[in-house]
Amino acid sequence: MTNHTCSLIFKRLLVAALLLFTSSVFGGYVYEFESSEGGTGNVSLLVEGDKIRVTSEDDRSSDMIFDASRSTMILLEHDRKRFIELDKETIAELASQIEDAMAEMEKQLAALPPAQRKMMENMMKGKMKGMSDALPELSFKRTGESDTKSGYKVEKVLLLKDEVETSELWVADWDDIEGSKELMNSLQAMAGMFNDMMKAFSKGPMAGMISGNTTSNWFGQIEDIGGMPVVSVELDSNGKPESQTTLTKVEERKIEASAFEVPKGYKKQKMKL
């Protein structure tokens, strides 16, 4: 092997090492969103590998950390310095508790005299609303209308809940989004867990809350959208714009491992019904 050949091999190895080093240092992406809704402030999406964090400028808000490799979701309550950790086992346990509680309530109602049972049912009618197996049906309508939003070529897609338009999404192709591979994989994994939670909590006291949150939620159907909404416009009951969330910045940078960990001093809370 000549000195020239050795030198060439060394240079190639050096270039490969530099590329590997650069990739490990700048392997994360930060997506910054701005909301027009009063008091919510800016929201950032931090993505690196199979981890994702949704964080807000408001210290009183609850941040969320998701680990796709472990299928775990952590909710941080900064004002109380505590956190809740959800995984498949926790969700299944909560769903079982809901079913047991509903069965016990029905048993107690059945044992009451007819007049008293009817009175109790009328009193609980408002609270019982939405306690059924049927979740709102979400669907999308592609309009074919194109535009440029936040520097991306986008298509207007309407989100419908039970055939009523609730959101106007301006969707960019995944290939046009920086760091799209990790972002898409993380969002799809998180959407799978979110949908499991929707099904598990479709009964009982959490059903109404879930029904309300699905009104404008495109997240659980991220695969069906075929891209990333860079602008999301929430519509009121009259179909008029109510609030808007816009992607304002995408930055590739090193993200410290601590960003995906529970802060020191935070206490774990057991989730109860």
Image (cartoon, rainbow, N blue to C red):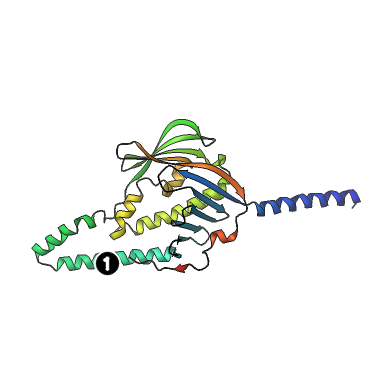
Where is the C terminus found, in terms of image quarters?
bottom left
| Rendered location of residue 61, percent (x, y) | 43, 56
Q: Nearer the viewer, residue 41 or 203?
A: 41
x and y percentages locating residue 117 in the rendered image: 13, 63
Identify the residue at horizontal 49%, vertical 54% (top origin). Answer: 55
Count neighbours of disc 1 (C-alpha within 10 A) and say few if under 14, some if 14 to 19, many if 20 or more. some
Horizontal side of residue 77 vs 13, given as left or right: left
Q: With respect to residue 11, does 234 lie above or below?
A: above
Q: Which residue is mark 1?
A: 101
| Residue 45 screen position, x and y as percent | 52, 50
Q: Is residue 226 visible?
A: no
Tell me what residue is drawn at x 52 percent, y 55 percent: 52
- Residue 54 drawn above or below residue 241: below
From the viewer's perspective, tell me whether residue 129 is left or right of residue 221. Answer: left
Total count of labels: 1
Mark 1 element type: helix
Q: Is residue 24 left or right of residue 113?
A: right
Q: Can you give x and y, in whole percent of width and height, for residue 144 in the image?
A: 44, 31
